[in-house]
């Protein structure tokens, strides 16, 4: 058996790891912003409904 028969493993570079971390961080921030916007919209609609009921 020669050395050419062994498969070469792809080395894990720090840039690959950094890219994965950056992608995960961006996705987490995106979800947080979307969730915050949904919460703010819901709160605003509830406040508007409450104001409308109390000022009738």
Image (tube, rainbow, N blue to C red):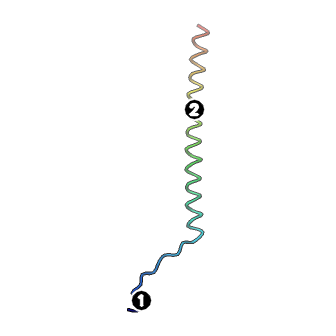
- Quadrant housing the N terminus: bottom left
Q: Foreground residue, 42 or 3?
A: 3
Q: In this view, does 28 lie above or below 35?
A: below
Q: Circle 2 sits on which residue?
A: 39
- Quadrant in which residue 51 is drawn: top right
Q: Where is residue 44 in the image (x, y as percent from the top left)?
A: 60, 25
Q: In this view, does 39 lie above or below 24?
A: above
Q: Determine crowd level at label 2: few under 14, some 14-19, many 20+ residues with C-alpha closer than 10 A.
A: few
Local secondary structure at mark 1 = helix
Q: Circle 1 sits on which residue?
A: 4
Q: Where is residue 26 in the image (x, y as percent from the top left)?
A: 58, 52
Residue drawn at 60 percent across, 31 percent down: 40
Which label lies toward us, 2 or 1?
1
Q: Where is residue 27 in the image (x, y as percent from the top left)?
A: 55, 50
Q: Foreground residue, 45 or 24?
A: 24
- Quadrant housing the C terminus: top right
Residue drawn at 57 percent across, 72 percent down: 13
Q: How far apart are marks 2 and 1 (CA)?
A: 59 Å
In the rendered view, does 38 fall on the left or right side of 3? Answer: right
Q: Outermost residue toward the front?
A: 1
Residue drawn at 59 percent across, 58 percent down: 22
Local secondary structure at mark 2 = helix
Q: Are marks 2 and 1 in contact (CB under 8 Å)?
A: no
Q: Determine crowd level at label 1: few under 14, some 14-19, many 20+ residues with C-alpha closer than 10 A.
A: few
Q: In this view, does 12 lie above or below 56?
A: below
Q: Outermost residue toward the bottom?
A: 2
Does label 2 or label 1 sit earlier along the sequence?
1
């Amino acid at each position: 058996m020669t050395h050419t028969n062994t498969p070469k493993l792809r080395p894990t570079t720090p840039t690959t790891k950094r890219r994965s971390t950056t992608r995960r961080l961006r996705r987490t921030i995106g979800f947080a912003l979307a969730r915050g916007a949904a919460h703010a919209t819901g709160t605003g609609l509830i406040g508007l409904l409450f104001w409308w009921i109390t000022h009738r």
